[in-house]
Amino acid sequence: MPFAPCISVRDTAASIAFYKKLGFEADSSAARSGDDIHMLLYQGGFCAMLYSNADLKKWLPVLADSPIGLSGMLYLGVEDFDGFHGLVSQHTEIIKGPLTEHTGQRVFYFRDLDGYVIGVNDNAAFRDSDLGSKYAETES
């Protein structure tokens, strides 16, 4: 099972609106009454949780003194790399790329409203690369 991030945000409504502009969907059905936590989906697949920073500090008090953000990045694989790049560039700054890495992977990076850096990978380029053939998912 891959890691699934739960990212702490200042304003979940603003974050949901931002991600919806980029083609994501939000589903709040898993939240208990009064919780400000939301599943973030891309093309029907779960990719992360958005959690109100205030609520997260109550849920896990060990994080109470932790700032919003992280030292690293999150990655998202997409089928329509060029189309998604075009959409993202209309709503936020592209901070790096697009570029093709030495592995053949195409990638670009943008920052969301809370400063999280999101790297976007081209699924088709990955599948066609030597690395992709090594780690390709097989259908059961």
Image (cartoon, rainbow, N blue to C red):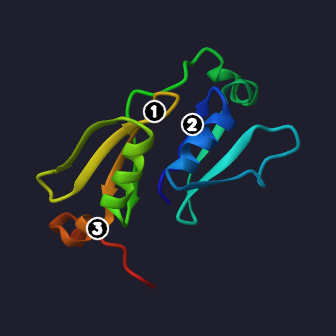
The amino acid type found where label 3 is placed reads Tyr
Q: In this view, does 122 lie to the left or right of 90?
A: left
Q: In this view, does 139 lie to the left or right of 14?
A: left
Residue denoted by label 2: 7
Question: Judging from the image, what secondary structure is the residue with disc 3 in?
Answer: helix
Residue 140, horizontal then vertical, whole percent: 45, 85
Residue denoted by label 3: 135
Where is 130 relative to 138, above or below?
above
Nearer to us: label 3 or label 2: 2
The amino acid type found where label 2 is placed reads Ile
Q: Is residue 1 left or right of residue 98?
A: right
CB atoms of marks 2 and 1 within 8 Å: yes
Q: Which of 51 and 130 is in front in this view?
A: 51
Residue denoted by label 1: 116
The residue that appears at 49% across and 26% down in the rendered structure is: 69
* Quarter of image, res 54: top right
Q: Is residue 115 left or right of residue 128?
A: right
Q: Residues within 10 Å of mark 1 (few under 14, many from 20)?
A: some
Numbered label attached to residue 35: none
Of the numbered discs 1 and 3, the one sitting upstream in the chain is 1
Label 1 to label 3, Cα distance in Å? 27 Å
The residue that appears at 79% across and 47% down in the rendered structure is: 31
